[in-house]
Image (tube, rainbow, N blue to C red):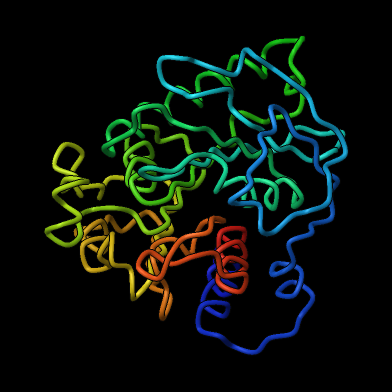
Amino acid sequence: MKKALCVVCALLCGISVYTHDYVSLLSAIGPYEVNVINYESAPFSNNVYTKPLKQHFIEKSLHNEKIFKNELTVFYPETDTKEPLIIISHGWGDSKKSQMSLAQYLASHGYAAAVFSGDACLYPEHFLAAIKEAHALLRQAVQDPQSHLCNKIDIQHTAVIGHSMGGTAALHYALENTALKAVIALNPYNGGSKLVELVGGTNAVLGSNIADIKSPTLIITGTHDNLAHPEKSFAFCKNWNQHTPLAFFAIKGGKHAHAIDRIGNDYVGTFDAQKHSLYRAVIFSW
């Protein structure tokens, strides 16, 4: 953990370090070939990868039509061993398409990474329900001999990542599920301007009290996040316990959408290759 934290600090502070570890982290290509289940094309995303993946599979069972718009998409490395699982949640008004680049990056570095498109996810508590259901479906899949994920995922080693309201939900899922190995919240929503709060609320149901989390927790935001104000995101760190590692970073000039792979606008931020690579590297380091 200490080594990972040093890598995180160096990357975010812009320290010029040219070791193999730092360079490889910034690269979008990891050491493993990647396969995918239930791939979905992403015309307004997918700004990182253009090379077709080695193998595509379909598994209709990775779906709950009451919670998701379609099947979960899972990227996983081509290895002979079971790999840790990372569940990734999108934010409000978004879909799994903007998170597929992160999922593919993590898979190329030795993790199975699952993304979903939540249906009718309007508030953080809806995203929490979606993360729970995704985890449940993946638990079933790894026990199913007919699934491509059987003997591919170490379900006992699971981490959760979420962006915006999905980040808020990820933090609260870690509060409930103490077995998670790590939780990462990207620009987690805990309120913003009055106009934003008229649409997205103030996270009134889940709240910001997550001080009893047992999983190592990383929160990344941006100094210019106009949707999820950094100072309100920082409230998640209040009264933190002394036994769980916690890191909170604000990327200078960072906006709300810099964590995701999607064309946006000047207000929320749009895809930025350098910032996206920074997010990927920090996430993998943690």
Residue 252 is left or right of residue 242, and the answer is right
Q: Would you place residue 218 above or below residue 22 in this image?
A: above
Q: Position of residue 214 (x, y in %)?
A: 38, 45
Question: Which residue occupies 60% across, 18% down?
Answer: 62
Residue 247 is left or right of residue 18, and the answer is left
Q: How many marks?
A: 0
Question: Which residue occupies 59% across, 14% down?
Answer: 140
Residue 252 is left or right of residue 103, and the answer is left
Question: Which residue occupies 16% across, 52% down?
Answer: 197
Q: Quadrant of the N terminus?
A: bottom right
Question: Which residue occupies 23% across, 53% down?
Answer: 190
Q: Would you place residue 148 above or below residue 158 in this image?
A: above
Q: Along the line of sight, which residue is nearer the eye, 266 or 104? A: 266
Q: Position of residue 254 (x, y in %)?
A: 42, 73
Q: Along the line of sight, which residue is nearer the eye, 93 or 249? A: 93
Q: Along the line of sight, which residue is nearer the eye, 57 or 3? A: 57
Q: Along the line of sight, which residue is nearer the eye, 242 or 64? A: 64
Q: Would you place residue 16 above or below residue 210 in this image?
A: below
Q: Quadrant of the C terminus?
A: bottom right
Q: Position of residue 230 (x, y in %)?
A: 28, 67
Residue 124 is left or right of residue 44, and the answer is left
Q: Position of residue 111 (x, y in %)?
A: 69, 43
